[in-house]
Image: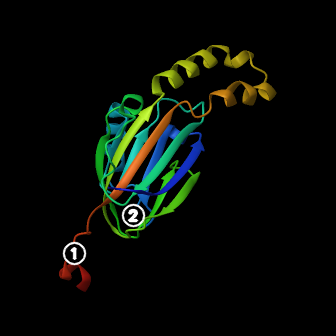
Amino acid sequence: MSHRQAQHQLLLYPAYRLIVVRDQDNDAGVGADAAIAEAQEGIAASTGYELYIHCAQDLLKVHATLEIWDDTPYPDSQVEQWGTPRTFRLECPSGEMSMGTPTGEAIGADLPAGPGIYTIDLTHRGRDEADRLRKRIMVRYDTIPLDQLPDELEPHAGIEQYRIRMWWHAPLPEEDDEDLDD
């Protein structure tokens, strides 16, 4: 039976409506434009080095949970709440993950199994509700005094949620000896 080894949570305003999950040693941006465009159409996409999650809105804080498992997680009893997972593979050469926005706010997480290729299951809930709330607030946005804006937004923080479950899948491919000679 598999066990969850770690869980990391983040409540953030998703800059550019994005949450990015990647190994800290991976070069940001390799194939990013195509993956971001794909995520805008289908919620999430991966370059194989980074996972891009396109949030439904960026006015309210979004809740993201990164779960690290020792093996394929047991069947999810909450599938009705979270929906069917979307599955991705991600190369993690350092075994140190980063999850956050592309422009700053992020948390780190160590992968107990170390470097390797990891499988990621992404599920979400609350996207439609968060988008409806954003639209309702935007209709009144110009009439809300700035000092009252946090009071208006804070009760809705975390309605849009993402759960990222990851586990070790395979070792990284061996580097080609010819590449090492250059």
Residue 111: image location, x then y, percent: 43, 65
Badge 1 marks a residue whose secondary structure is loop
Q: Identify which residue, 131 or 179, lies in the foreground.
A: 131
Q: How far is mark 1 from mark 2, CA to CA?
A: 16 Å
Compared to residue 74, the image places residue 43 above or below, namely above
The amino acid pointed to by label 1 is: Glu
Q: Which residue is mark 1?
A: 174
Query: Is any part of residue 182 visible from this angle?
Result: no
The local crowd at label 1, few if under 14, some if 14 to 19, many if 20 or more residues have their Cα within 10 Å, is: few
The local crowd at label 2, few if under 14, some if 14 to 19, many if 20 or more residues have their Cα within 10 Å, is: some
Side of 142 relative to 85 (left or right):
right
Compared to residue 26, the image places residue 82 above or below, namely above
Q: Which residue is mark 2?
A: 26
Residue 15: image location, x then y, percent: 55, 41
Residue 153: image location, x then y, percent: 67, 28
Query: On the image, which quarter does residue 123 sit in?
Result: top left
Query: Is any part of residue 159 visible from this angle?
Result: yes
